Image (cartoon, rainbow, N blue to C red):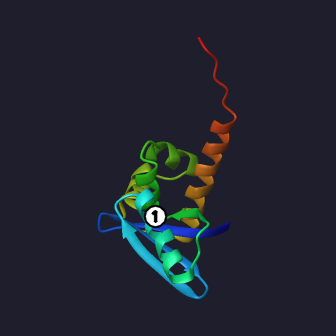
Amino acid sequence: MQVLPLIIEKADGALWGRVAYDDNLLVDSAPTLDELRVNMKTLLQEFHDLHDIEFTYAYDLSAFFEQYAYLKVSKIAEYAGMNATLLRHYSAGSKQPSPEQVKRIEDAVHRLALELSSVQLVAA
């Protein structure tokens, strides 16, 4: 099985994906992540005869907050130690974060995920 990074961005109301393979950059768009995944696998099959493909995912902030819409932007901002309004601008694509800001947000998401992974629930 071949595992490749799929970079996902949101633009013009669609999700755009790109995969670099063998000095080629394959790009396509789709309305959903599932459709984008299928499109990218099809391109890799057609151009490189790859059939057993899995992806790791890297998102821009707009695509991330669309894909994980159930996350509260204000809570992620709190974990990142930043202004929630600014993070809303980043998630809407109306402002662009610096690489350092993106790293702060990514670290906050990872901390939140780690915290949630240690939660234990009991029946009442």
Q: Nearer the viewer, residue 51 or 39?
A: 51
Would you say residue 116 is visible in this rendering? yes
Q: Nearer the viewer, residue 55 or 82?
A: 55
- Outermost residue, bottom direction? 23
Q: Which residue is mark 1?
A: 38
Q: Position of residue 74 (x, y in %)?
A: 45, 44
The three-letter code of the residue at mark 1 reads Val
Q: Quadrant of the C terminus?
A: top right
Q: Is residue 61 above or below residue 111?
A: below
SS label for mark 1 = helix
Q: Is residue 104 above or below residue 22?
A: above
Q: Residue at x 39, y 52 (%)?
A: 85
Q: Residue at x 63, y 55 (%)?
A: 107
Q: Position of residue 43 (x, y in %)?
A: 47, 76
Q: Position of residue 77 (x, y in %)?
A: 50, 49
Tally of numbered discs: 1
Would you say residue 94 is visible in this rendering? no
Answer with left or right where residue 94 lies relative to residue 122: left
